[in-house]
Amino acid sequence: MKRIHKKDKTKKGLLIVLISLILVIVILVILNVMLAITNAKRKQVWQDAESFCESLFESGAVKEDVMEEDMKTCLEKLDKVDRQDKTDSYREAIKDAKFYLEVKNEIANYYDEEGIFKEETREAELTETEHAFGALAEPYREKLEAEINRLWAEFEKVRDVKEVVLGLFDGLEDIEYFEQAEVSEAVGREQYEDVRQLVDTVSQVELKEKLQLALKKVDEKISRDEQILREKQEAERRAYLARLEAERIERERIEKERREAEERRQAEIAAAWHILDIRYISQNHFEVFNGCEAASLLMGMHYKGLLLNTEYRKFVDEMPKSDDPHTGFYLDIYGYEPRDEAHWIDAAPLVAYGNQSAGSSAVVDLSGSSIEAIKNEVLNDNPVVIYLTYNFEDLKEIVNGAPVNLHVVLLSGYNQMTDEYQVIDPWTRRTGQYVFTVAGSRIDSLYRQVGQKAVVVRSE
């Protein structure tokens, strides 16, 4: 009995040990399961926080649509992660993002609800914002760089337009006090228009109104100056026109006096003419191309009542011809050939022929006489046949005692006031002209150069 009881006790002890081992194993299993569940939960918490926080960023910067609440949620999720070393980078990123949003909001505050830059912004404020911008992480500086540049551009635009308007006034430093300031005398309409166009581009309504009020004062001042200038210019214009009118009247008076004086002078000149009314003979009309001596002499003789019934052609035909111009007409009195020397008759044989034809001694050789003597003959109503040149031109080559361009004409008048001669040329021009007025000095010069040859027809 004792042996059986002892065995039972041994079995019972072993059973207890076995059960204890089983309980330990179960507990260990339970603990492992619980640990796995805890680890899984921790992992899930981290993955959830990481996934959410990661969704807030893109290319190293927070997304533009992320709100403050989103970043707060991210931090709350990170707080649930038991290992802080995993969350440090996200916490730092959230810190940078918050700072970015602060700077971004600060920039936004420089604009009103309509997106117009606030004109009251001070340079110191912008400088402080720019310093904050400089402290941003690189991705955020890239995002806001254009906005910072725009801020300064808007600020400078406002500052510059104010300065331009202030510059229109003397000593004005604040646009608020433009009413008490004087507009600068140097400001003109062109400068005003340039500034007005600049002010028209201003977006700030209140500032624009203030600047326009200041410009109105400038415009009024310029308008007054322009009116004064117009009145001055009108007065000057009227004075100028008055001067012109006075000058015109004076010119007309002077011109009238000049015309009257000229008319008197012309009347005096006309009265000073002593003209012989001589009947004209045209040598070329009769085709006597070298008959200038005969035509001139016959006109003079007709004037004196000699050979009135003698026709020119007959007078030419009967003129003595000779190989020597000192005894008769030399070469061809009718034709042109030869052209290299003069076809002519000297004064002495011409006088002899005239007297012989008229049976008188009225024709006198004046060759060698002074020009004064010739002038006196004309004034004494005696026509003078004179040896000159065609068209009163300079002498050409002299052949056989006469220039190639020798031409004989008739002096039929003289003006003692102007020292001019009226000359009848027997060679009629194509225009029909045959009477010429020639200066006494020219007649004298040619008369001397040709050899002082002249013939006068006097009364018997």
Image: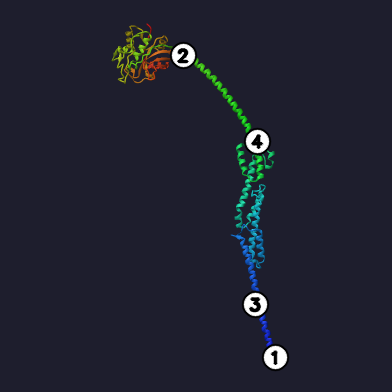
Distance (Cα) linking label 3 and label 2: 161 Å
Give, as a three-letter code, the residue at label 1: Lys
Instruction: Tell me the SS state at disc 3.
Output: helix
**Picture quarter containing residue 3?**
bottom right
Q: Disc number at residue 6?
A: 1
Q: Which residue is mark 2?
A: 270
Distance (Cα) linking label 1 and label 2: 195 Å
Give, as a three-letter code, the residue at label 3: Val
Instruction: Tell me the SS state at disc 2.
Output: helix
Between disc 4 and disc 1, the foreground one is 1
Give, as a three-letter code, the residue at label 2: Ala
Q: Is residue 89 visible?
A: no
Q: Is residue 346 above or below residue 144?
A: above
| Number of other residues with Cα within 10 Å of mark 3, as a class: few under 14, some 14 to 19, many 20 or more | few
- On the image, the x and y values in percent for residue 381 come to 41, 9
In the rendered structure, the answer to whether residue 286 lies left or right of residue 179 reads: left
Between disc 3 and disc 2, the foreground one is 3
Q: Which residue is mark 3?
A: 29
